[in-house]
Amino acid sequence: MRQILASLSLLLATASGAALVEWEAGVAAFEAGDYPKAVQEFRQVVEQSPEAHSGHYMLGLSLGRLGRAQESLEHLRRAYDLNPNDLGVRVALARAYFAERRYLDVTKLLDGVSEAELAPKLAQAIYQMRAVARERTGHPAGALEDYDRLTRMAPDDGEILLRYGVLLAGAANLEEALRVLERAQRVEPTNPEVLGTYGQLLKRRARLERDRQVKQQTYLDATEVAHRLVAVESTYESHLFACEVRLGARLYSEAIDSCQLALAKRSDQWLPLFYVGLALCSEDRCAEALEPLEQAAQFASDEDLDRVWRQIGFVHEKRKDYELAIEAYQRAGDEVGVARVTESEKISTMSAEIAVENELIEQEYQSLEQMRREAEELEEQLRELEEGPNR
């Protein structure tokens, strides 16, 4: 900063020696943190040398330090108009635009800046600001380029790795996003945002995976992340995430425990109750699953209610409570489920009727066998009578 001020002082002296006293007083006040005094002095500089960009630049910086954003921006813009080639002015104006969320203006100012023009620390700040601005203005490819540079400049910056990983995931580059976020969670192993984002992407990969072994291992990896996440941030969201990945990993008892912890945080949420029902039924405890599922139906929104009733229908179907299953599937608007259960009920009824008929046939057969045996015994007795005692 001192080198920049010295250069600007020289430029101002060349342009107008009359304003030099106020300039030096303004610089001294600025460096001492006396920004009201700095504003006062630099206003005089601007009044005496209105075409000198350095006065507008320092007045803009001083106003910015006082939180007078609009006035600051006006003078920084004037400084840029007077000297658009001054890199310090461009960067200061870009920062002012960034603070006002004028991201398109930021990208226009910084798109032409090359790494060769910048000191390493300034380059990192510029790329980070430009990456966000490009992302917010719908230019993810440019943002990805900047984040790629940033990760090479600052390989151990967890925040940069996190933002880069999120952007990669948004660009449908899931595997690269996971590699970046795996680095981020090693750099910041207790950062809940990093752990949560990494865990969610592992869950997404597991859901997309078709190979059962790989799917199972990915869910298990996610459960390890979930374990660390709830240790640093015991929230409804973290416990619900733990429940989801443990359910995916078929750790049903642990999934139920996690859902109960989520419910302890927010008892009026349908999803943990729904997951408890799923886990219980997966453990062949379908009779116990009905209670949490019916509670879930009380809290679910209209768009989620069909999902709950479909699961209730499945539980009844598995228990061969066909009438209740059909009713639940109807409430879910699941015509396929209704048709399937109706057919199962017919088959079950037919099977029952056949079983009854077979039982009757068996009874008739046993009765005939009994009669045959009795007839044989009677014939034997008659023969013995006919043959008499002389036999």
Image (cartoon, rainbow, N blue to C red):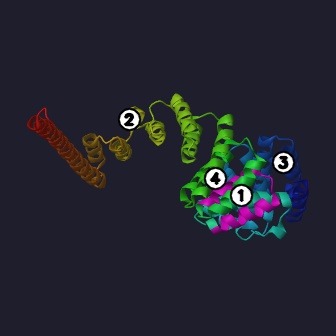
CA distance for labels 1 and 4: 19 Å
SS for dot 4: helix
Where is residue 180 drawn, in percent x and y?
71, 57
Q: Left or right: where does residue 129 sit relative to residue 332? A: right
Where is residue 143 drawn, in percent x and y?
67, 64
Name the kind of residue labelled 4 in the image: Gln
Alpha-carbon neighbours of circle 1 within 10 Å: few (<14), some, or many (≥20)? many
| Residue at which label 4 appears | 217
SS for dot 2: helix
Q: Nearer the viewer, residue 109 or 67?
A: 109
- Whether residue 300 appears in magenta in the rendering, the answer is no
| Residue at which label 1 appears | 180
Numbered circle sitting on residue 290: 2
Name the kind of residue labelled 3 in the image: Gly
Nearest to N terminus: mark 4 or mark 3? 3
Dominant SS of magenta comes to helix
Name the kind of residue labelled 2 in the image: Leu
- Please identify, in this view, whether the residue under mark 4 or under mark 3 is nearer the observer: 4
Numbered circle sitting on residue 26: 3
CA distance for labels 2 and 3: 75 Å
Q: Which residues are magenta?
A: 141-169
Tell whether label 3 touches label 4 (CB within 8 Å).
no
Where is residue 217 drawn, in percent x and y?
64, 52
Numbered circle sitting on residue 233: none
